[in-house]
């Protein structure tokens, strides 16, 4: 009897060491995670209709803010060429001859406050106008060119602030050749303010929708936990740690998030594809080659990452609330 | 292996399921636990399985005092024990192989080792040809044997069985009991709760008899 006891003792020590080595092996660790991840994915696939429906709801909630952000980003890019850089339009008096205008432009270019000066002569302005649909006929009825010469001045980088730019505008106004100097800043500022409001609005919507995704994933995982109650009890009874029991549900949440994000990405890209033609048409009417841009891969990366985090967080919340309560009795 | 010293278990509400139980079951021993329903058999097993905690007394498992074991360490302790239930608690959404593999997956065995060990356990219980089947397609006796395979696949030091033959006919019961003897022969400690007195009397193992939460047999050592 003693012999057997001693043998068992050895057996137990060996057992213990073996177990420690197993737990510390990184390969086993990764293998285990990969296995759980695949198993969770397989479970989703087996209930593909309901999984897809859940993922689709998540996708819509993710696609909304993503699409709006992208739209805003494009509007921002459209106004980006003026981005904070107010130009000053200096209209010259009609009496100023072309040569004087040319030398004025040259002189002004030397000012430290000035970055670039573009001279648009009355002839150039007229030519530009006539190119536009509808204007040629009107201009033909006029005896003489009514358009003034124009200097388009971009302030140097140190003088782009509203105060400095308006001081520069005043300096131009004081020139004897100037009829009117206009600072094209206000509308840029207004647009920027509007964009800022929209950005905030989208941020609020995004937060609400992210919360909705969180709750949705949380609820789905909660139901899943209820469905697998028996399995949880059995695995706990044969030595599963809470971590082990938690893992498949966390992966399930991650998969929902990722799946939702990919579908959302498809929705956004499709939406922008449908919009791109009419937008290009509209831009064409404004003589612009503006095009909607979505940076598909970057967007996919960001959305998948976001979906993953939301999925993990949502399932974590559900698991924390419901899993630990299931103990064998 | 199992040492109870003055253990009492009182459930909320005042019902005392076990009072002042003391016994010691040595490593490598096999014993039966008998008593009428309500005598406290299940409670005793639940204490050993760390499902319930005693209200008084000390419980030692494998030389370790587990009366106040932290929740964190319970899973690791349970891995040293193989459980066999009356309703075998198999998972019906996975195959026999996957059911038996579960303790190994939980303990973090490598994939290659899992296959080897599961097949060895199934082979021992004559279930090798059924590994791909789902438990629902098996007979009651086969299901019980799958449950046993799952309990022993991890080479536990202690087997706990709660009415393992409760739903089986006498011949199958005898077969199951002889399986337990086989495991005991290779050094596994076995504690079986059963009220199948005729069968127990056929087998020559010590019996712990519970009556109204007390040990009817004198407290002592089971070896």
Image (cartoon, coloured by chain):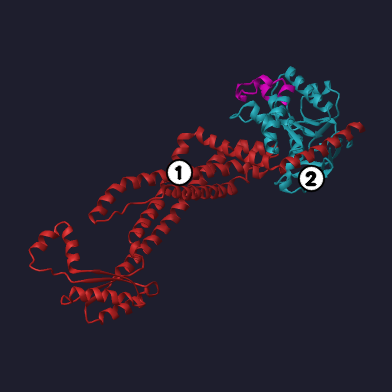
Q: Does residue B30 appear left or right of residue B104 in this picture?
A: right
Marks 1, 2: nearer the viewer: 1
Which region shows up in magenta?
Answer: B121-143
> Which chain is represented by red in the image?
A
Residue beneath the point at 58% across and 39% down: A37
Numbered tag placed on residue A262 in the rendering: 1
Is residue B141 inside the magenta stretch?
Answer: yes
Image quadrant in which the N terminus of chain A is located: top right
* Residue at the image position 56 percent from the left and 38 percent from the top: A40
Q: Nearer the viewer, residue A320 or B68?
A: A320
| Residue A323 screen position, x and y as percent | 61, 45
| Nearer to us in this view, B70 or A280 | A280
Magenta highlight on residue A301: no
Q: Which chain is painted in cyan?
A: B
Residue at which label 2 appears: B66
**Image vertical order of residue A152 relative to residue A12, above or below:** below
What residue lies at 29% left-to-right and 77% top-to-bottom?
Answer: A107
């Amino acid at each position: 009897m003693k012999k057997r006891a001693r043998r068992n003792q050895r057996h137990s020590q060996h057992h213990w060491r073996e177990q420690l080595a197993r737990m510390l092996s990184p390969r086993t660790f990764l293998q285990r995670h990969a296995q759980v991840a695949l198993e969770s994915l397989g479970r989703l696939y087996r209930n593909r209709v309901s999984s897809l429906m859940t993922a689709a709801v998540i996708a819509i909630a993710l696609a909304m803010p993503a699409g709006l952000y992208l739209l805003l980003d494009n509007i921002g890019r459209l106004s980006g060429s003026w981005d904070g850089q107010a130009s000053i339009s200096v209209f010259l008096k009609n009496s100023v001859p072309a040569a004087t205008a040319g030398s004025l432009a040259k002189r002004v270019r030397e000012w430290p406050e000035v970055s670039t000066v573009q001279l648009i002569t009355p002839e150039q302005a007229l030519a530009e106008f006539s190119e536009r649909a509808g204007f040629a006929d009107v201009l033909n009825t006029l005896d003489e060119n009514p358009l003034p010469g124009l200097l388009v001045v971009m302030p140097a980088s140190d003088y782009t602030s509203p105060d400095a730019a308006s001081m520069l505008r005043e300096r131009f106004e004081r020139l004897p050749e100037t009829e009117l100097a206009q600072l094209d800043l206000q509308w840029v500022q207004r647009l920027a303010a509007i964009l800022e409001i929209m950005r905030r609005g989208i941020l609020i919507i995004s937060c609400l929708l992210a919360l909705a995704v969180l709750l949705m994933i949380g609820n789905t995982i909660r139901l899943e936990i209820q469905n697998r109650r028996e399995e949880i009890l059995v695995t706990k009874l044969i030595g599963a740690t809470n971590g082990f029991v938690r893992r498949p549900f966390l992966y399930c949440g991650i998969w929902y998030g990722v799946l939702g994000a990919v579908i959302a990405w498809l929705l956004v890209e499709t939406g922008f594809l449908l919009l791109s033609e009419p937008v290009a048409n509209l831009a064409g009417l404004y003589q612009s080659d503006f095009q909607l841009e979505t940076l598909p891969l970057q967007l996919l990366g960001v959305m998948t990452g976001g979906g993953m985090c939301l999925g993990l967080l949502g399932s974590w919340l559900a698991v924390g609330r419901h899993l630990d309560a299931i103990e064998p009795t | 292996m199992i040492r109870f010293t003055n253990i009492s278990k009182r459930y909320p509400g005042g019902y005392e399921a076990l009072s002042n139980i003391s016994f010691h079951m040595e490593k490598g021993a096999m014993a039966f636990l008998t008593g009428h329903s309500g005598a406290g058999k299940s409670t005793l097993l639940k204490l050993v399985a760390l499902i319930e905690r005693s209200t008084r007394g000390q419980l030692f498992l494998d030389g370790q005092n587990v009366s106040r074991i932290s929740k964190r360490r319970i899973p690791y302790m349970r891995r040293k024990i193989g459980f066999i239930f009356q309703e075998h608690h198999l998972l019906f959404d996975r195959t026999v192989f996957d059911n038996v593999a579960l303790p190994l997956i939980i303990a973090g065995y490598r994939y290659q080792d899992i296959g080897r060990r599961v097949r060895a356990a199934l082979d021992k219980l004559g279930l090798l040809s059924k590994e791909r089947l789902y438990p629902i397609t098996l007979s009651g006796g086969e299901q019980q044997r799958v449950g046993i395979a799952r309990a022993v696949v991890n080479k536990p030091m202690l087997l706990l069985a709660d009415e393992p033959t409760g739903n089986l006919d006498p011949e199958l019961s005898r077969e199951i009991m002889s399986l337990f003897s086989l495991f005991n022969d290779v050094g596994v400690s076995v504690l079986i709760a059963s009220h199948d007195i005729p069968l127990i009397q056929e087998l020559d193992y010590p019996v712990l008899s519970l009556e109204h939460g007390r040990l009817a047999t004198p407290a002592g050592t089971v070896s």
